[in-house]
Amino acid sequence: TVSYNTNYAGSADDLNVDNTPPDVPEITSPANGAFASSSTPTFAGIMDEPSVANSPSTVRVFIDLDASDSYNVGDTLLCTTTISDDGDGSLLEVNNPWSGCVTGSSITPDGIYTISVESEDPFANISSSTDSGITIDTTDPVLAFSNGVSTASTSADIITITVTELNHATTTYVYSFSADLTCDAGDFSGGEPNFTSGVGTTFTTEAHNGEYFCARGTD
């Protein structure tokens, strides 16, 4: 008679293999195409986050400095943050917010840049990336009189001011008058008339004779 001793061993845990990339995050702030007045903007966005098993995921924001207008390996990392399951028991956290991705170094010079964002889950699976545009504008508008105030008596004076500015679309140009030689915030109390860059404004009233013309551009 031949007898055999047989033994079996098993794991108490279920096999759990995860090689699926996480969902692609989105940048919602600053919005695509927005202007940023700081060279170190803070980014925030949303992402679909599947269950607590994939939490927390790491979100990374990159900037394209090689003018390719899309993400490439080697693009400069601006910041990282994490996104976690909110604990409500949902298998899929739709539009789960992420925030607090603060740029570590200044984006220079001013101009238009492509920003990319990707995510990585705890199992080292990396999502594809999505792009967003941003314009860094930290420079005050530059105003120049291309047709100044007439020093001689005239029945109508035409004043033309040309503004050099990245962000013409959201810049406010107003003018006012000052009793002294200095144009400052005190000369602009609100509600001043607007002017258009490069277009002459005609004055025919004597109400401001002896005063100084002031112009302001705010982006």
Image (cartoon, rainbow, N blue to C red):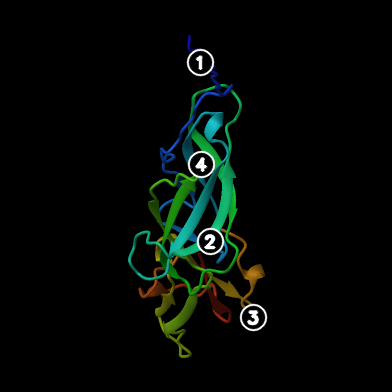
Q: Where is residue 165 in the image (x, y as percent from the top left)?
A: 44, 72
Q: What residue type is labelled 4?
A: Phe
Badge 1: how crowded within 10 Å, few (<14), some, or many (20+)? few
> In this rendering, which labeled residue sits more in front, label 2 or label 3?
2
Q: Mark 2 points at which residue?
A: 78
Q: Which residue is drawn at 46% across and 33% down?
A: 17
The residue lying furthest to the bottom in this view is 152
Q: Is residue 190 above or below residue 46?
A: below
Give the secondary structure at mark 2.
strand
Q: Which amino acid does label 1 sit on?
A: Tyr
Q: Mark 1 or 4 closer to N-term?
A: 1
Q: In this view, does 116 lie above or below 176?
A: above
User: Label 2 to label 3, Cα distance in Å?
Assistant: 42 Å
Q: Name the residue under label 3.
A: 182
Q: What residue type is labelled 3?
A: Thr
Of residues 36 and 215, the one drawn nearer to the viewer in this rendering = 36
